[in-house]
Amino acid sequence: MEVFHHRREINQHITSLKKEGKAIGFVPTMGALHDGHISLVHASKQQNDITVVSIFVNPTQFNNKEDLAKYPRTLQTDLPLLEKEGCDMVFVPDEKEMYPEPDLRVFSFGNLDKVMEGKYRPGHFNGIAQVVTKLIDIISPHRAYFGFKDFQQLIVIKKLIDDCQYPVEIVSCPIVREADGLAMSSRNIRLSPEERKHAALIPKTLLRAKQTGTSVSPARLKKAVTDTINKDPHLQVEYFEIVDDKTLQPVNSWDQTGVKVGCIAVYAGNVRLIDNITFNS
């Protein structure tokens, strides 16, 4: 496994591999790797000749400086894990390498970034667009892999790739969960043992909501999910929305066409967790 710190070096190396006809798969991460990330690596390895992983905690997508400072950084364990899993290349730039000067680009996503994460984290998706376009330009992959846990991010990135006309296939991979159902996240390691135990209520409640499904209205289901989680003193719902999987706009009736996804953000203490569930049509 080769580790690169400079964009020019890894770009030149990948360019030479592509000239040999190699298919390049790319997994962008912010490190603190877990089995969810590794599932993306495995998917890339199955579909490509070369798998590249980036590890970069991107400052422009954090609207909360304290959250940025507390984001786990575990490079000393991430690299051996990637090598063990057969990753071919890792790109580990520093902030100056990625942002030699301020990135003033502003992206438009219509209404996709006005709801949920975009509403509660102003500038979040613009920061993601900045770093993803930079990484795609550097790595120039044939396929890029993203987890379904960050569902809104996935939809926004698909639009970004389409708008920029990048010749890159975006591959979404299923949520990977802990034994008790909690969606794997780099933030989970910041949970206290007590918070971690109570956080299992989030997926449990979402699963119950899916089972309830269309027997009650979306509005009633939203209230039931929110009330159930908020009854736990360790948890506080920031939002729970049932949205169309294409437009991300709220669903008011189950009769509306399209797939419906329930998206949630919950604070467990000071740690913000997100998850989602897809409802049967």
Image (cartoon, helix red, strand yellow):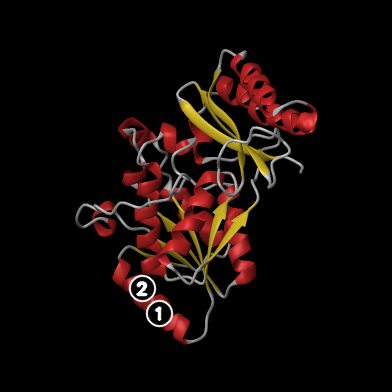
Quarter assignment of residue 119: top left
Left or right: where does residue 258 sit relative to residue 130?
Answer: right
Q: Identify the amino acid type marked 1.
A: Thr
Q: Residues within 10 Å of mark 2 (few under 14, many from 20)?
A: some
Considering only vertical position in the picture, is 220 above or below 148? above
Tell me how many marks there are. Answer: 2
Q: Residues within 10 Å of mark 1 (few under 14, many from 20)?
A: some
Q: Identify the residue under disc 1.
A: 15
Q: Secondary structure at mark 2?
A: helix
Quarter assignment of residue 85: bottom right
Query: At which x and y percent is residue 136?
Result: 41, 65
Q: Are marks 1 and 2 in contact (CB under 8 Å)?
A: yes
Considering only vertical position in the picture, is 189 above or below 16? above
Considering only vertical position in the picture, is 213 above or below 90? above
Left or right: where does residue 173 sit relative to residue 117?
Answer: right
The residue at the point 63 percent across, 23 percent down is 197
Left or right: where does residue 201 sit relative to residue 79?
Answer: right
Q: In the orientation shown, which residue stands out farthest toward the bottom?
A: 20
Query: At which x and y percent is residue 66?
Result: 33, 30
Asked whether residue 150 is in view, the answer is no
CA distance separating discs 1 and 2: 6 Å
Q: Secondary structure at mark 1?
A: helix
Q: Which mark is residue 81?
A: none
Q: Identify the residue under disc 2.
A: 11
Query: At which x and y percent is residue 129?
Result: 39, 53
Asked whether residue 45 is in view, the answer is yes
- Looking at the rendered image, the quarter that the C terminus falls into is top right
Quarter assignment of residue 60: top left
The residue at the point 21 percent across, 57 percent down is 100
